[in-house]
Amino acid sequence: MKPVAPSSARRWMKDRRLSLERWGLRLGIWAGPGLLRRITPINPNDYGEGRGQCIDRYYIERFLTEHANDVKGHVLEFADDTYARRFGGDKTSKIDVLHRTADNPKATIVADLACAKNVPSDTFDCIVCTQVLHCIFEVEAAVRTLFRALKPGGVVLVTDAGIQKLDSVDLKNREEYWRFTSLALRRLFEEVFPAELVEVKAYGNALAAVAFLHGLAVQDLKQEHLDYSDADFEVSLSLRAVKPNGPSAR
Amino acid sequence: MTAKGLLKAVLPAPARRWLRRQPLRAQRLLLGDSVLYRQIEPVDPNWGGKRGQIVDRFFIERFLAEHAEDVRGHVLDFGDDAYARRFGRAKVTKVDVLNLTADSPQATIVANLSYGEQIASDTFDCVLCTQVLLLVYELRPAIRTLYRILKPGGVLLLTSPGIQKISRGDMEVGGEYWRFTSLCMRRLFEEVFPSESVEVKASGNVLAATAFLFGLAVEDIRREDLEYDDPDFEVSIALRAVKPCL
């Protein structure tokens, strides 16, 4: 098939197949993939980005939209500057991108958050730290670095995974350590930030969790199913913490 | 003679067993996959315990059965002594049960693992620490305690989940904190135990995770499907570590 059909035709057919599959899923008449029979994910290739928007991104971006006002001034983001640009817009004056290794061309700071000598202190008005902490073994040290790098009054917006499959590439690179509960995330940050300035929220439910594990996308589920929040299923976690003004740095 | 008695008299045992399974099988067929897609709440909020064996117990008990030889002498178990007795049998000379709070009737030691100074050092031939570490916030002191209380040559058998829903009960008592990856578990224990004595194994696949999260039981899926390990889905992580002899 591949050598004959032009790529646009192949894409068209792939889209048709996906939308048919989706209607089948929604109506419940065709559950083709066989959830209770298959031992491999419906989409083993990625976290869902090949089918649409990743389910965890739905929660992450909802959280960042709610707190878009915090993304302003001098912003630090990790790996690339997408969220800083998208949610900061004109409010940002400068964006730095931190990466652990020097092979990322977008990186302006190369540092390991856990032993971050290269990260400046009292510098950032906002740190957008999405899906970073689970890759760091010494996560307590990383949280201390986040606190140190913030200006007094600065805000850190954190998201991380509660239920998520492993990334075999990350695992091979020794970068997959944790899945947190909301309580763990709260305690990690309350050791450094004042407790009253830490807000934690969890998102997800059983269906969202299973769909995410199978690599299904937001477009595969009904929105009301994604928005339903079941406290026992913390698929995604978000945290907002503020560094207090004044010389109270611990 | 009742109908049940008649069946019992007429049918051989395997046929009766087959018959007994049919209602559940029919229910499973009806439950099917399509329902799962609209199933936003777990089928059984009790982890699948009402339907049969809970999925993570399959992995935990398989791991303990593999290492049943290690369960001997003076054994420490957590919460209750079920696993120490079941896998240790006659090899066990004494069982202690550690619980965080005094409300477990079987508890002989009430302690927080992270501050377990009252537990004597070099005491246990085997420590069975199943599904405990996820409840401990201060991990490193807890792991040092586990090392300290083992006799030289003693064995730690530990399991903890990689994918699991929140346990409300645990969350409200002492709190629930972590899901580990096998890599994390290895690094945590290699900080205390010699690395050559630490073995880590992750089990599970997307089906096991799906069933576990939806509250389906081992009986709801094919057993051979549980045996398949997909490295992307670490549902249950098991660790065996040995304290070196002096």
Image (cartoon, coloured by chain):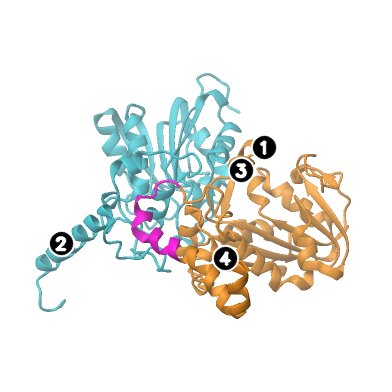
Q: Quadrant of the C terminus of chain B?
A: bottom right
- Disc 2 + disc 4, Cβ < 8 Å: no
Give me the disc on residue B176.
Answer: 3
Distance CA(mark 3)–CA(mark 1): 9 Å
Which labelled disc corresponds to residue B202?
Answer: 4
Do the residues at pointers 3 and 4 share their chain?
yes
Q: Colour of chain A?
A: cyan
Residues indicated by labels 2 and 4 sit on the same polypeptide chain: no
Q: Position of residue B130 (x, y in %)?
A: 69, 57
Residue highlighted by disc 2: A16
Q: Tag 3: residue type? A: Glu
Instruction: Tell which tag, 2 or 4, sits nearer the viewer.
Output: 2
Q: Nearer the viewer, mark 2 or mark 3?
A: 2
- Main SS, magenta residues: helix
Q: Earlier in the sequence, mark 3 or mark 4?
A: 3
Give the distance between the C-alpha atoms of the residues marked 1 and 2, in whole angstroms.
50 Å
Amino acid type of the residue that numbered disc 2 sits on in the rendered structure: Arg
Name the quarter where the N terminus of chain B is drawn.
bottom right
Mark seen at residue B173: 1
User: Which chain is displayed in orange in the rendered image?
Assistant: B
- Other-residue count near label 1 (Cα within 10 Å), few / some / many at <14 / 14–19 / ≥20: few
Residue B203, placed above or below residue A225 = below
